[in-house]
Amino acid sequence: MKRTLLTLGLLVFSFCCFSQKKIKDEAIIHQQERMVYKQWDKDKFTPEWKWWKPNSYAAYAATWLLHPNYKDLDRRPLKPGGEHTQRLALAAAMQVSSNYYKKETDTLRNTALTEITNYAGAVSSLDPLYNLYYKKELAPLDDIKGNAFMNVPQKVIQYLAENGSYNWYLTEMNSLLERFSTAKRVDVDRGQRILMYHRIMLEHRKLVESWKHSVDLAAMMLDYRDKLKNVKETGGYPDAPVKSADERLDDIMKRRKSLQ
């Protein structure tokens, strides 16, 4: 029983020791309000001296007689022209200046990226004009040997390989391929790069036409040689249909066009 009473007494004593009492001091509340957000109200400077309350003079004198001019000067940090107001205005001005410099920096950055895109060979494959036109026109350079003999008889291929025409064709095509690769890789102005593509394309077209002409001439020559060989073996000319003058003229014109 004694232990129980002693325990209860200790608990009550501990609650009394650690409990807190809420203090409501109007002077502190008014000071906090006017220093933060409310106006500088002279009627809320407490404690006040009231003549019908003689005991209020001691608190009034201890607080305000030592600072008689405190009420007359607005000391709020957020007042017009206050310290914190000036800091906020300075921060806003610095923010405007920072945004201006950021805009200028972004402009320089975009200009630099544009210049890099125009000059850098590493991104030349992203050029719209290259992808829409020159990539397709110069695609045969990716497979030179595969495009050399298309629908060409084997005997013509063998003849061109033996007389050196095929080696000449490969040398010229590989030269164009090397120039094309260099044009895509080198760091030059975009306009200069496009001109390089165009020159290579024109030379490629000219070389392809010359190669087709060589293949056609080789095919005609081999066909003529086979006919002569047939004449020598048979001992006479093969029977040929009689053609009129107009038909012979048409044949001459067709052969002339094929040789051009």
Image (cartoon, grey):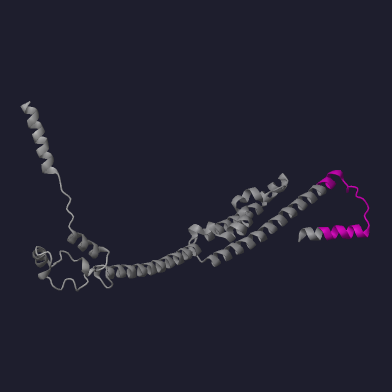
Magenta segment includes 242: yes
- Determine the residue located farthest toward the left in the rendered image: 2
**Is 26 placed left or right of 133 in the picture?**
left
**Place of residue 102 in the rendered image (x, y in percent of width and height, measured from the top left):** 39, 66
Q: Main secondary structure of the magenta part?
A: helix
Magenta segment includes 172: no
**Place of residue 176 in the rendered image (x, y in percent of width and height, measured from the top left):** 59, 58
**Place of residue 213 in the rendered image (x, y in percent of width and height, measured from the top left):** 72, 57
Query: Which residue lies at the image location 76% right of the left edge and 50% below the top edge?
Result: 222
Q: Is residue 19 above or below residue 247?
A: above
Query: Which residue lies at the image location 11% right of the left edge and 66% below the top edge?
Result: 60
The part of the chain drawn in magenta is 229-254
The answer, for residue 74, to whether it is visible in the render is yes
Q: Is residue 78 above or below residue 140?
A: below
The image quarter in which residue 84 lies: bottom left
**Is 175 placed left or right of 63 in the picture?**
right
- Determine the residue located farthest toward the front in the rendered image: 52
**Is 198 placed left or right of 79 in the picture?**
right
The image quarter in which residue 112 lies: bottom left
Query: Which residue lies at the image location 31% right of the left edge and 70% below the top edge?
Result: 89
Q: Who is closer to the viewer here, 206 or 168? A: 206
**Place of residue 179 in the rendered image (x, y in percent of width and height, measured from the top left):** 55, 59
